[in-house]
Image (cartoon, rainbow, N blue to C red):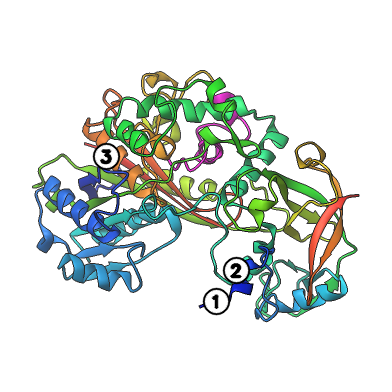
């Protein structure tokens, strides 16, 4: 069925879909290394993840904003065991919830460190570190 | 207690004994075999069932498909499927349907061959869905275990909780499992290393899977299933076993939100609703059947259900307090051996109802003397992200 080239390809990070109707616009902006989030001009709610409606009011008026790219690690784990074809080659690696200074809490990986077992902690200040792909960039973080 | 309503009771139960079916039966057959045994346990039969509850693990259009497969014609159908807690939701909904007079005999079933299918539940990739949430998160490679681990990590940061305290959950559960022949057989069939009581040291010295959670803080992936029959008071009066009344229920959800505290689960919302309806307090519980997907799930839930204050769970569980032979120290935890050491085929919620019922009937292998009240609390989905919770308070006559 699948050609042999497909099978030989190295396992790759699973990438988001650019045409997903709620979050596609976020991902399209990452091509320019922009971390966008939504705020309602009517009620002020910061909506995350991105979506078409405001969760704070029923006559929402969502506007895109761009994060300055600084945040704090809310919690993390170092994955030692994964059966995923790509991530199994990356263990041990750190996954983290990061609270951006503007409010959105997003899930990501900590990069730019030698040892995730000793260099990641709750409350740590981090900065966005973009991983470039063909049509988008992945927002990772690195110690600030 | 005088205002406590006794409109519906668990009257029949069955836990499918095998945790490794080696391809000999499928999930639907486990559901049907368990249903037949649970109905027989109650002294009822297929044609008595007028309400079907199904979480959809058997396939699409589950309420219709399972009715045909069983050969029943229910007039109440509920296919709430919100993960491992679905069965506590089903019990809550069955109580309401029976109280309303829409049903007299409700049937809940579960079947899974997760072990035989080699399903990588805990450390596999995220599901192939393209929900907006998935589209934001899948790139990070957060295993399910890592999701729960992030709750533990934050709990440790906020409250000083230690791995040794979390290990208390695992050791108490294993202590109970060693008294349950089906749990011992399960661990044997699933090739557990060291099928014996464990120490705190055993747990914290076991392999790290996702910091700070060790191997012995993670549930098994088994085959299995079971069934529960819930009946109206008039039907229950003529059943073979004494009724285990559903005294109160509560339901809730939680999902990632900016600035939210992930050490508090949806259980903090569902449990007070259930206790209020039942007219009882956490301190009165003899039995706590709490979904032990991981050690941290139980620790956070002991706090959320009101057994101790938020953040104090670590100190509260110390010294073997959760064992069945410590009745003056609060409820006995997961006396069947739990998902950690007895049965976890993916959605454990039904087993919480089964063991709570066995305790209130006096049928447990780690029987608490004169157990009168139990809570079954299901948590479905991911504790550190989106999850559903339902609390069910049970009591006997």
**Secondary element at tag 2:** helix
Q: Identify the image quadrant of the C terminus of chain B.
A: top left
Q: Is residue B315 visible?
A: yes
**Residue of label 2:** A7
Q: Which residue is mark 1?
A: A2
Q: Establish if A58 lies above or below B302.
A: below
- Pointer 2 chain: A
Residues at discs 1 and 2 both on one chain:
yes
Quarter of image, res B240: top left
Query: Which of the image's four quarters has the N terminus of chain B?
Result: top left
Residue at (44%, 43%) from the top-left corner? B291
Mark 3 residue crowding within 10 angstroms, few (<14) / some (14–19) / many (20+): many
* Pointer 3 residue: B357
Name which quarter of the figure residue A84 lies in.
bottom right
In this picture, which residue range is highlighted in magenta?
B288-316
Q: In this rendering, would B312 be left or right of B321?
A: right
Please tell me how many numbered marks the rendered image carries: 3
Q: Are marks 3 and 2 on the same chain?
A: no
Q: Are marks 1 and 3 on the same chain?
A: no
Q: Is residue B17 magenta?
A: no
């Amino acid at each position: 069925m699948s050609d042999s080239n497909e099978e030989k390809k190295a396992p790759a990070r699973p990438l988001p879909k650019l045409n997903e109707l709620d979050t596609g616009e976020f991902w399209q902006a990452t091509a320019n290394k922009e971390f966008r989030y939504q705020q309602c001009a009517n009620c002020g709610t910061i909506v995350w993840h991105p979506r078409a409606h405001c969760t704070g009011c029923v006559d929402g008026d969502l506007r895109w904003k761009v994060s300055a790219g600084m945040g704090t690690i809310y919690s993390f784990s170092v994955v030692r065991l994964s059966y995923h074809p790509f991530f199994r080659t990356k263990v041990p690696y750190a996954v983290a919830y990061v609270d951006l200074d503007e409010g959105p809490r997003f899930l990501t990986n900590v990069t730019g460190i030698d040892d995730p077992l000793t260099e990641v902690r709750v409350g740590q200040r981090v900065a966005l570190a973009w991983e470039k792909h063909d049509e988008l960039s992945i927002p990772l973080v690195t110690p600030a | 207690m005088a205002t406590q309503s006794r409109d519906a009771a668990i009257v029949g139960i069955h836990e499918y004994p095998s945790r490794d079916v080696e391809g000999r039966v499928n999930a639907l057959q486990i559901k049907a075999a368990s249903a037949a045994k649970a109905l027989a346990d109650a002294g009822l039969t297929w044609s008595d069932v007028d309400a079907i509850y199904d979480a959809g693990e058997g396939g699409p259009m589950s309420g219709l498909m399972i009715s045909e497969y069983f050969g029943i014609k229910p007039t109440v159908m509920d296919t709430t499927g919100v993960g491992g807690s679905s069965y506590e939701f089903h019990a809550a909904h069955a109580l309401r349907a029976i109280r309303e007079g829409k049903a007299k005999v409700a049937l809940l079933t579960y079947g899974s061959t997760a072990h035989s299918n080699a399903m990588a539940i805990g450390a596999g990739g995220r599901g192939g869905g393209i929900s907006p949430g998935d589209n934001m998160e899948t790139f990070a490679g957060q295993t399910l275990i890592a999701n729960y681990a992030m709750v533990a990590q934050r709990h440790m940061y906020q409250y000083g909780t230690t791995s040794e305290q979390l290990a208390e959950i695992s050791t108490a559960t294993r202590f109970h499992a060693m008294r349950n022949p089906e749990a011992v057989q399960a661990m044997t069939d699933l090739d557990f290393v060291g099928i014996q009581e464990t120490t705190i040291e055993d747990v914290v010295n076991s392999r790290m899977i996702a910091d700070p959670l060790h191997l012995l803080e993670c549930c098994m992936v088994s085959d299995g299933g079971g069934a529960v029959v819930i009946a109206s008071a008039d039907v229950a009066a003529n059943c073979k076993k004494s009724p285990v009344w559903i005294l109160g229920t509560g339901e809730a959800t939680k999902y990632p939100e900016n600035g939210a505290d992930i050490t508090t689960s949806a259980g903090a919302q569902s449990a007070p609703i259930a206790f209020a309806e039942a007219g009882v307090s956490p301190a009165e519980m003899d039995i706590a059947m709490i979904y032990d997907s991981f050690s941290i799930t139980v620790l956070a839930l002991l706090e959320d259900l009101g057994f101790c204050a938020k953040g104090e769970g670590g100190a509260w569980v110390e010294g073997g307090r959760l064992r069945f032979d410590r009745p003056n120290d609060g409820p006995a935890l997961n006396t069947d051996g739990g998902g950690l050491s007895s049965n976890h085929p993916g959605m454990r919620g039904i087993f919480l109802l089964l063991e709570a019922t066995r305790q209130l009937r006096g049928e447990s292998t780690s029987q608490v003397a004169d157990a009168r009240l139990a809570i079954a609390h299901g948590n479905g989905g991911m504790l550190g992200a989106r999850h559903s919770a339902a609390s069910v308070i049970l009591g006997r006559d």
